[in-house]
Image (spheres, helix red, strand yellow):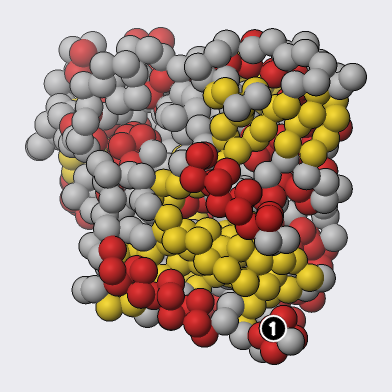
Amino acid sequence: MTLVLDPRHVAAIRRHGEADYPAEACGLIGGSVEEHYKVAVQLVPLVNRRTDAARNRYLIDPESFRRAQERLERDGLEVIGVYHSHPDHPPVPSAFDREHAWPTLSYVIVGVGRGSAAEPKSWVLTDDRGSFEEEPITNEERKVVWQ
Amino acid sequence: MAVTILIPTPLRPFVGGRDAVQLEGGSVGELLDRLTGEHAPLRPHLFADDGRLRSFVNVYVNDRDIRQLAQRDTPVKAGDTVSIIPSIAGGTAVADVLPHLSHEEILRYSRHLILPDVGLEGQKKLKAARVLLVGAGGLGSPAALYLTAAGVGTIGLVDFDVVDKTNLQRQILHGTSTVGTGKLESAAARIHDLNPNVRVEPFETRLTSENALDIIRDFDVVADGTDNFPTRYLVNDACVLLDKPNVYGSIFRFEGQASVFHARRGPCYRCLYSEPPPPGLVPSCAEGGVLGVLPGIIGSIQAMETIKLILGVGEPLIGRLVLFDALKLQFRELRLEKDPDCPVCGRHPTITALIDYEAFCGIGAEPSYEGAEISAEQLKDEWQRNPELLVIDVRDPHEHAIAHIEGARLIPLSELPDRLGELDGHREIVTHCHHGARSLKALEILKAAGFSKVRSLRGGIDAWAVNVDRSLPRY
């Protein structure tokens, strides 16, 4: 699978990461799955519920997830991924990310070094939950989607 | 009418893309068991290995969280709606990413890749894995070769020895052409030839309490191929302190043992052997001999267990000790229990940092033999001046047959206590063995029996062959 992420979405994810720095920012990615592509259509920025350790943890509680899922479904979209920031850490999933990961979702991570966000990377949990594999990000399909 | 289970988007591919499933059942637990029974690949995503619902999986019955109800015993009736709702968590820490395989690697590992339990992902795990081999000798040789061939990405080697001709009978990592070079250099060349994709990280040093934690810390699995007790306890304790699995093997003459010690999941080496044997009781390979194929078998078991740990397949040798008898060609298995009072992995550990393992194993605390030894040259001189001097060879008869000092009398160490009557207490006595260890034990026996004019040949018959009689073969 390839994640199709519009430059607009990438910019929004980076901005969110910078705005919440040094805490972790998080949100859901709504879109549709089309054969070999997961196409992002709409971001749902959410509040990080981990107030105790927001610098290195994030939490999207079930209520927020349910509301976001319902809203996206009304628009004919589904939750295709999650984004979050790694303040002062590279955009690679941690063991903690893996232990708590859901299958099939794209985990888009943006590293925010000293308050400045870099290019995000996307990861998908392997079927045995043993690790993450990097998933390519493209914006090639954008025209098709928005036509 | 059945109960409706609402499936969240990330799990829909596991139930044929549907957003809801209808099932019959009386409780939430029953429903979820039925759901994951019908869609088995779903199970690991909902339940942890211990069978409990994962912390980030929330289950609601008609909008009420089952945590506020009766958990998995929460009753459901026809017409109810059960929702599985994710909470999503994560955060920064260590990288955990699988590498890619080149076309060359895919071809090289094709027999692995077509194994369902390995496959592309397993092979990538092997490539990502970092295995530390302590010792590049008898056990380390087959382990290193098979791990290299299997495509373990990084192999760390700890050894400080030089390849000796007597190693080649069993240490198949080395060759005649590398006799005299460092074992690590020799090993790295062989590994590179076998599989250039493997990275070797050499540690040309003795593993010590000072460096063990720093060396072991960066590896995923440790395979212990050491031949001495201080290092074995050191490797064990360091692995317990760092939460690393320790794939253990040891050999003696025709017998071997293997196990996997991982304190988090089972016993450690100290649970099995809380204390080392008295120094000198268990002879090393150099003293006791070893059949060359034996480390090949035990070291291969270590390689196999290491690979299973990396892949996460099968049943690891945790909590089990395999005993192998080459002469009977028999494997036996002992159950190992974790010792709750184990000083390092028990409930109240007293060892929380590495200790002095030489002292722990009684090495260096041996009685002083100063003045009790004699050099080969000195023995030659004294013997010429005093033909009455009695030289006793305490080796076994089969060693005597390989080479012996002309004029020495063979009394194997095991027979010595019963044959003291044959000896004349007034004569000067010099004991000798192969390298000078057993003859010191003979000395103790003789002194305890009242013999006073006794000394031991330092370096044994080997020193004699080097410094006095070059016509003797060394072994």
Relative to A142, does residue A53 appear above or below in the rendering? above
Using the image as rendered, state which of residue B148 and residue A79 is in the foreground: A79
Residue drawn at the location 36% of the way across and 45% of the way down: A49
Which picture quadrant has residue B434?
top left
- Residue B37's image quarter? top right
Residue B280 position in % (x across, y down): 34, 29
Q: Residue at x 67, y 50 (%)?
A: B10
Q: Position of residue B233 (x, y in %)?
A: 34, 34
Residue sitting farthest toward the front: A74
Q: Is residue B58 above or below residue B267?
A: below
Q: Nearer the viewer, residue B474 or A91?
A: A91
Residue B316 image position (x, y, % from top left): 63, 34
Q: Is residue A85 left or right of residue B139?
A: left
If the image is split into quadrants, where does the N terminus of chain A sit? bottom right
Can residue B400 be seen from the camera position used here? Answer: no
Name the kind of residue labelled 1 in the image: Trp
Mark 1, other Cα within 10 Å: few <14 / some 14–19 / many ≥20:
few
Task: Locate residue B471, reporting x and y percent.
Answer: 45, 62
Res. A117 visible in picture: yes
Q: Is residue A7 left or right of residue B10?
A: left
Observer-nearest residue: B137 or B94?
A: B94
Q: Quadrant of the C terminus of chain A?
A: bottom right
Local secondary structure at mark 1: helix
Residue name at image x 72 percent, y 40 percent: B7
Q: Chain of mark 1?
A: A
| Residue located at (47% from left, 52% from top) | A97
Q: Is residue B344 left or right of residue B427?
A: right
Q: Is residue A71 above or below residue B361?
A: below
Is residue B95 depicted above or below B384 in this figure?
Answer: below
The residue tagged 1 is A146
